[in-house]
Image: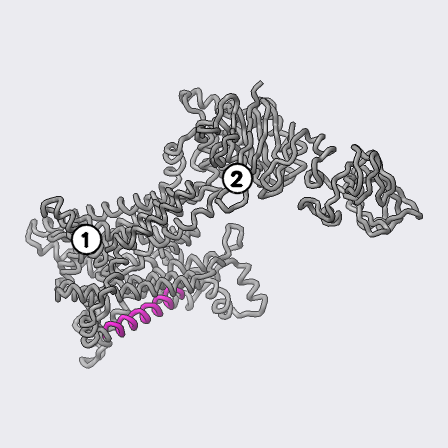
């Protein structure tokens, strides 16, 4: 079946001398699927969205193409203007039309219908986001969360094949963001639209996504399900971007490696100098007067806690443990990795721009 | 010769736009108006290529030293007076509250509605030796009493300051309003007295706005030739007008105008300098506003009397005098004569003002729309934005400079058009030349209003509309224009009334026999036909009151930019 969106090898730079904002990006979104584009700010996520909806034109390249459903909207000799692409868009700043009522905003994209029909469709879409009661209000009379739901309804009303959401929740406070996340995911799933959702918030990404694409420096560095990416990151950058991570220098001997924590089994065979990825929750920590490390700092979350440990050799580790485990600062502990670890090529101190010390990722 | 010097410049722009496709619309929409506005100035500057030493020597031997001295003194006088008066009034109405302050806050802007060439002659009739005020004083104080020689430089400063202080007042008031209580509380907590708070916190914070206000007043001072002529003060603008219109010495007039242009550019540069790093307003709706201090009893009474006296001298008395004259004139006129002349001149004025307003706003709309922020490529717009700023430079130029510059710029075209039309149309003596000059002079006003209103449309709004299936034309019609309506109407009104009041450009460039209310008023007034001049003068004042009140609304709502980008 044709995917709702297929992007092939598109690149974009804003000046001949500038770096590429997007470089040879390829991406697919299946019908009804929510794909989250995740990356730090400035990685080219928003530019990629603008290339897809036609507000920017990719660099000319015979191999580059963008197809929405079965319609090629960009390719050799083709560049469909934004208004003919049938792509809905939801923005961080909502971008509602301030001079129109809520229902007029939602009906804006409903052309070719008579007035009554357009109004009925707009009201039905407002109903989906539970805002039909506010149809006659103006945007400035609504809260931020309500405005964003109106923006979602406006984008959904013309029943686009594809919906693009550009950091839609980042103007909202945390609690609202979490609530709206669930609601929006529900609305998207019920409407069956394919969605490409841009965010830099990993929690949002992991909880919204059917599939994830991680971007770095204008490139898509890995795609997959949230579980795949969390468990099997392609690079230390992806590993760190999706969650707290410890990287330990180690010597690999095929199926296992030796590091400061002793012998650790490897997910896949490796040899020579490597760095091991060990997630904080994959460490067993127990109080042990003869242990080889001590607790430096505790971030207590209730259901669990994040311990910052200092090994006697000076290495620092993050460990996530049950919140019930009482761990006073300064307590001696012993640390054991649980399950096989993932080995990455050793690159000295470089870990692809992600934060280096575990201390700073706790802060 | 302009052609040769400008083609490479356009070529460079074209080259840049080839490299960067997103660039050309914005660049062209800004480059064309910038080119049109700069052309007259370039035309004047090019006259330096063949400086006529004899003319300058002659000017230097005759009136130039006096003109320079008077122009300098006039600018210093008007600058200092408007600065002191405008700042003090703004401080008074923003820091204190007393009975009637809300009304007075609005009334204080009204004097701007009486152009200098009207206030000048009315004041002359009232305050001169033979006028009612000095006559009355002599009756009380003895026949030897003389106030001061009103027909003098101080008299001209007095009149110009009374009509121009509202520029400083409006901007200072907006600046003081935007300062937050927290800033002043912090200063008080640091041990500053109320007086020290004014001098060391409020005033320095308002400096950019004060500089902008004084610069506007100085530009109007530079452009004036009528007031100084009533008051027998020889200045540069007055000299240009005299050389051109009376002595018909066109070369000398042009040379003098180029000097005037340099001085005007100097005002712009000094103002820009004083305003540099100027964005330190405490903005935002969440800043706690300053609670005004209540004045009561004798202090409130003293303040009220002072303010009312100022309003009386600057607005009430002149308008009353004009009304009295107008009634007398209408009563004494032979039936039909006044109507016919007045009707014709009114029609000319309205047609010209409407034409100028539509032209200016159309160009401004095109510029603002092409330069609107469009998200990602915002940095690419630096050059067009600079061009747009150049395009608004005409506002700083005295009317005589604009008029002569336009004549020079159109001169090469004149020949061609004369040829085409078999001698029927002379561009520079037609309405086209006049409208061109109005465009040069008033584009800044139109552009700043339109641009400010365009800021209501965010780049994302436009993108949202496009992604909802609206082609650019529909986005313009459904999103941009409805949101810009107020700004466009404001621009139309401001340009309309500024054109209606405008004197020097109209004096120079009006087609033969096409009088306007402003020219008619000035002609009659300069012949001391005060009563006859009152009818058109009063019409101009009444038409200007509306926009004056509009200005205070604009400056109220943080539309600071609107004012500042005029420069």
Using the image, name the chain to which the residue with label 1 belongs.
Answer: B
Total tally of numbered discs in the picture: 2
The dominant secondary structure in magenta is helix
Residue at 13% across, 64% down? B248
Residue B412, labelled with which disc? 1
The answer to whether A112 is drawn above or below residue A338 in the figure is above
Q: Is residue B542 magenta?
A: no
Q: Along the horizontal axis of the image, is A226 left or right of B413?
A: right
User: Is B76 in the magenta?
Assistant: yes
B547 left or right of A206 in image: left
**Element at badge 2?**
loop
Q: Position of residue A68 (x, y in %)?
A: 52, 25
Q: Position of residue A334 (x, y in %)?
A: 89, 44
- Label 1 secondary element: helix
Q: Nearer the viewer, residue B419 or B84?
A: B419
Question: Which mark is on residue A93?
Answer: 2
The reply to whether residue A190 is in sight is yes
Q: Residues within 10 Å of mark 2 (few under 14, many from 20)?
A: many
> Which quarter of the image is occupied by the C terminus of chain B?
bottom left
Residue A249 falls in image quadrant:
top right
Query: Of residues B437 and B171, which is closer to you in this image?
Result: B437
* Extent of the magenta region: B66-87
For marks 2 and 1, give the CA distance: 52 Å
């Amino acid at each position: 079946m044709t995917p709702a969106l297929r992007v092939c090898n598109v690149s974009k730079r804003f000046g001949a001398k500038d770096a590429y904002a997007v470089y040879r990006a390829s991406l697919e979104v299946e019908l009804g699927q929510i794909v989250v584009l995740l990356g730090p700010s400035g990685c080219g996520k928003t530019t990629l969205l603008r290339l897809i909806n036609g507000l920017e034109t990719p660099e000319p390249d015979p191999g580059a193409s963008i197809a929405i459903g079965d319609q090629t909207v960009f390719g050799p000799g083709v560049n469909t203007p934004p208004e003919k692409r049938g792509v809905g868009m939801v923005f961080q700043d909502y971008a509602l039309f301030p001079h129109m009522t809520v229902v007029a905003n939602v009906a804006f994209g409903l052309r070719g219908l008579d007035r009554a029909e357009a109004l009925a469709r707009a009201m039905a879409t407002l109903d989906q986001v539970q805002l039909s009661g506010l149809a006659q209000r103006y945007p400035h009379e609504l809260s931020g969360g309500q405005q964003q739901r109106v923006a979602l309804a406006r984008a959904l009303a013309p029943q686009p094949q594809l919906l693009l959401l550009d950091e839609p929740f980042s103007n909202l406070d945390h609690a609202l963001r979490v609530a709206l996340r669930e609601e929006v995911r529900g609305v998207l799933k019920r409407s069956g639209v394919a969605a490409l959702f841009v965010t830099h918030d990993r929690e949002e990404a992991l909880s919204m996504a059917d599939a994830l694409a991680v971007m770095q420096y204008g490139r898509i560095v890995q795609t997959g399900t949230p579980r795949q990416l969390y468990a099997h990151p392609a690079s230390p950058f992806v590993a760190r971007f999706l969650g707290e991570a410890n990287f330990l220098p180690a010597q690999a001997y095929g199926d296992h490696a030796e590091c400061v924590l002793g012998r650790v089994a490897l997910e896949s065979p490796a040899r020579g100098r490597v760095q091991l990825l060990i997630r904080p929750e994959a460490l067993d920590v127990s109080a042990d007067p003869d242990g080889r490390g001590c607790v430096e700092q505790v971030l207590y979350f209730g259901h669990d806690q994040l311990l910052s440990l200092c090994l006697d050799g000076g290495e620092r580790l993050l460990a996530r443990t049950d919140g019930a485990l009482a761990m006073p600062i300064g307590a001696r502990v012993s640390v054991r990795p649980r399950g096989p670890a993932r080995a990455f090529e050793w690159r000295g101190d470089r870990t692809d721009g992600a934060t280096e010390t575990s201390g700073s990722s706790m802060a | 010769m302009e052609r040769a010097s400008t083609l490479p410049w356009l070529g460079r722009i074209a080259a840049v736009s080839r490299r960067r496709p997103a660039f050309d619309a914005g660049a062209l929409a800004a480059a064309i108006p910038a080119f049109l506005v700069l052309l007259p100035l370039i035309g004047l500057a090019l006259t330096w290529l063949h400086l006529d030493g004899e003319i300058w020597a002659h000017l230097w031997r005759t009136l130039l030293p006096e003109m320079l001295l008077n122009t300098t003194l006039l600018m210093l006088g008007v600058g200092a007076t408007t600065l002191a008066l405008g700042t003090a009034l703004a401080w008074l109405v923003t820091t204190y509250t007393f009975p009637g302050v809300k009304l007075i806050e609005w009334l204080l802007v009204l004097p701007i509605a009486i152009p200098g060439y009207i206030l000048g002659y009315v004041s002359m009739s009232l305050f001169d030796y033979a006028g009612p005020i000095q006559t009355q004083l002599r009756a009380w104080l003895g026949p030897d009493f003389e106030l001061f020689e009103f027909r003098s430089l101080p008299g001209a400063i007095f009149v110009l300051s009374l009509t121009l202080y509202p520029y400083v007042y409006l901007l200072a008031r907006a600046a003081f309003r935007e300062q937050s209580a927290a800033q002043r509380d912090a200063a008080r907590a640091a041990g500053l007295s109320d007086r020290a708070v004014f001098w060391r916190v409020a005033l320095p914070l308002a400096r950019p706005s004060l500089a902008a206000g004084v610069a506007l007043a100085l530009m109007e001072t530079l452009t004036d030739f009528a007031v100084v002529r009533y008051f027998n003060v020889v200045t540069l603008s007055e000299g240009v007008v005299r050389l051109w219109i009376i002595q018909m010495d066109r070369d000398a007039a042009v040379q003098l105008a180029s000097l005037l242009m340099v001085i005007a550019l100097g005002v712009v540069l000094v103002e820009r300098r004083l305003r540099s790093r100027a964005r330190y307003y405490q903005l935002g709706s969440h800043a706690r506003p300053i609670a005004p201090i209540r004045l009561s009893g004798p202090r409130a009474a003293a303040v009220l009397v002072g303010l009312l006296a100022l309003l009386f001298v600057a607005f009430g008395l002149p308008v009353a005098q004009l009304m009295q004259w107008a009634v007398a004139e209408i009563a004494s006129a032979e039936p039909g004569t006044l109507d016919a002349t007045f009707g014709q001149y009114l029609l000319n004025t309205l047609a010209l003002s409407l034409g100028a307003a539509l032209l200016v706003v159309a160009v401004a709309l095109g510029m603002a729309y092409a330069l609107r922020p469009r998200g990602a490529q915002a940095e690419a717009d630096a050059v067009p934005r600079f061009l747009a700023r150049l395009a608004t430079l005409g506002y700083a130029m005295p009317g005589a400079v604009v008029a002569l510059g336009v004549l020079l710029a159109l001169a090469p075209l004149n020949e061609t058009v004369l040829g085409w039309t078999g001698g029927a149309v002379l561009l520079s003596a037609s309405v086209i030349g006049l409208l061109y000059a109005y465009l040069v002079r008033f584009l800044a006003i139109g552009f700043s209003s339109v641009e400010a209103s365009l800021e209501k449309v965010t780049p994302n709004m436009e993108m949202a509309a496009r992604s909802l299936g609206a082609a650019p034309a529909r986005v313009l019609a459904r999103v941009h224009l409805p949101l810009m309506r107020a700004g466009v109407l404001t621009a139309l009104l401001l340009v309309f009334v500024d054109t209606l009041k405008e004197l020097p450009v109209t004096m120079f460039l009006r087609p033969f026999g096409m009088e306007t209310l402003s020219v008619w008023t000035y002609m009659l007034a300069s012949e001391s036909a005060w009563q006859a001049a009152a009818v058109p003068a009063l019409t101009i004042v009444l038409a200007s009151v509306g926009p004056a009140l509009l200005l205070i609304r604009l400056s109220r709502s943080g539309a600071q930019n609107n004012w500042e980008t005029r420069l």
